[in-house]
Structures are given as C-alpha cells and as structure tokens.
Amino acid sequence: MPTVKIVEVDSFSPLPEDLLFRLFALEAPWIMLPVIQRVFLFDNAGGQHPPFASLVGSLRASLVATLARLPPLAGRIVFLPSTGDAAIDCSASEGSGMRFIVAESDDADAGRLAGDAYHDVDTFKAFVPKLKVDALPAEVLAVQVTRLKGGVAVGVAMHHAVVDGRSVWRFLQAWAAACRGDDAAAEAVVAGLTFDRAVIALPSGGELTRSMLRNYAPNLPLDINLFPSAPINLPRRTFTVTAEHIHRLKQRISDHTAPAQAGSTPAPSSFVAVVALAWVSFVRAKHPAVISADHDVYVFFFIDWAKHPASTRPWCSWPPRPAAAACRHPFACTRITWTRSSLGGVLRE
C-alpha cells in the first residue's frame, strides 16, 4: 500500500458567533453510526492543476466560506449533562472546529487509482481523515487533501448524526462552487435553508429525544461508536451501466411482467431497474444455496418525500416540514419503499 505522510494539520471554526443545535428524536439514533466517507481523485494528466500549495489554499479558503453558510458542519457533537441532551456546539472554544489535513504520497498514482475497475480500498482509506467519534465531544467534519503522483485526492469524513447522503452532496456542491469562485452558485445551493429545530414538531418533543438517546447510546458521553473495531474490508468495483444497458434491462423486466398485470403495472424507472439488477445479483452471489430462482426477495430504502404535497403522502401524520428546512433525517416526511424482485427477473414496486 502506498505511504501517506501527514504534512500539516489545521483546525478552524469560521463562525462569528456561538451557536448550539440540539439533536432531535429523528437524529438521535444515528449518533451511534458516525462516519460517512467520500474520496475524490483528480488526475492531472493534462498538467492543468495549479501548484499544490495554491490548490490547498483555494480549497481551505472556499471551505471556510462554505462552513459559514452551513454552520452545523463546523461544530462538535457534545453532551449536555444538565438535560441529558446531545447537541451540535459551534462555539469557538478550545478543541472545537474542524480539522483540515494536508498530506502527500509519492508512490500513489492518481491516474491508476482513478482508472482501476477494482478499487484499492486500503489506499483510499489513507486519503480520508479518521473522525474522532468514540466519545462526546465528537467531530462532525474533517477534510484531507493529499498530493499524489500525477494528481490530488480530497477526502471527507462526516458524522452520520449530522448529515445524510443528500446533505453531504449539497455541502460538496456548495464547496465546489465556492472553490470555483462562483459565489452565486454557492449561495443558490444553500438558499432558503433553515436550521431552526422548531420547524419539525414531534410528539413529546425533548423527552422523546432523550429517551431515544438513552436507548441507542446509554453510556453517553462515552461509548458512542457502534463499530469500535476495524470494519471488514470488502472488495469494491465500479460497474458502468450505459443508457443502452438500462433500456434493455427495462425491456426485460416488462417482458417478465405477468399478462394480468401488464396494463396496471407502470414501466420501471431507471433507478428501480438498476436497483433490481444490483439486488438480484447480490442475492444470487451471497445465498445461492438457500434461495432459488422462484423465491421473492425484498429490499427497502428511505426516500425524501418532503418536496411532494402533503395530500400525496397520507402515511405522514406529522405536519410537513418546510422544503428548505435542513434536518438530518426527515423521517416525518419519508416514505419507506419496498421493492419486490424475484430471482427470475420479475420486478414490482
């Protein structure tokens, strides 16, 4: 595995005032599932990158500007013993703020790492900072910029109690726009966002949150990492699914639809078709001895339903949240979607 040397570690909190955001009940369970990791490889085969020091300066300055727009990401998750709550503390106290790490690796080739079908997972992990999450206070965000042979890696680690998949990409879009110098685009990404916890009214309010914390993290502020030991390293590979592949896959699904259902079953979306392919492939690979071709297998996932009118989501009994409310996991406006897929290829929603 290539050697990665840490050159600089900086910590900063770009906020001009102290802010405290209490976690609420729908965020509390995720305090035990702390880390979302992303790594981006930039190949400089064309020689268009600026000098590494200049590139680091641009990334650092634009990150500060982005965190000013998204203040919870610049804080730490803390325990409030007087009430039993957990909160995101954005004050500029000692040990607060986020870490910005600069590293270098002379033997890691950006072009090879980006182009390999089978990914070098151990090397990728070396490009992502290790978030300090075993106890509260816990970090929310850390960033690492690594100079590679022929390119750069940008690694991001974020706490799962503060962000989900959608908010991770919103943060990255805002940061990228700021780094390009496009302040208008950066503002547009976060336009209208509010971090007011009062916009999501849950039954029993704070007591429900404290009950969730006691259930999921009974030893607060200690022992909040559900996976303290090293996770199992699974091989990773990228598969490219072209538009032509998706079209043929949809056609195959339609061909397998029972005649009695053909008129009432809508054509599968591209997302459903690809998920079905991945799910069936996974089940076939993992459980060939116990699941036969005529068995039905199920997968479910959460989708954000907040942008849809309340009349289209009767399963949501709580008041709809404003579309611009920035909450971690909007379960009150989330639909649990079940997808049924037989190993023979039939798919239904």
Image (tube, rainbow, N blue to C red):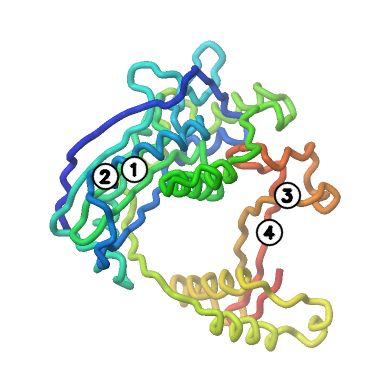
Residue for point 68% across, 59% down: 337
**Vertical comparison of 334 with 32: above or below:** below
Tell whether label 2 touches label 4 (CB within 8 Å): no
Residue topped by disc 2: 54
Q: Residue at x 78, y 45 (%)?
A: 316
- Residues tagged 1 and 2 counted as in contact (Cβ below 8 A): yes
Q: Which residue is mark 4?
A: 337
Dot 4 amino acid type: Thr
Mark seen at residue 307: 3
10 Å neighbourhood of mark 3: few (<14), some, or many (≥20)?
few
In primary-sequence order, the first of circles 3 and 1 is: 1
Looking at the image, do the residues carrying marks 3 and 2 touch, with CB atoms under 8 Å apart?
Answer: no
Q: Amino acid at mark 3?
A: Lys
Q: Which residue is mark 1?
A: 58
Residue closer to the observer: 163 or 102: 102
Q: Sequence order check: which comes first, mark 4 or mark 2?
A: 2
Which numbered disc, 4 or 3, marks the residue that appears first in the sequence? 3
Dots 3, 1 in contact, CB < 8 A:
no
Of callouts 4 and 1, which one flags the residue occurring earlier in the amino acid sequence? 1
Give the amino acid at mark 2: Ser
Q: Point out the frontmost of discs 3 and 2.
A: 2
Q: Quadrant of the C terminus?
A: bottom right
Q: Position of residue 41 (x, y in %)?
A: 32, 58
**Measured from the top left, where is residue 291 in percent x and y?**
53, 75
Can you say which quadrant of the picture contains the N terminus? bottom left
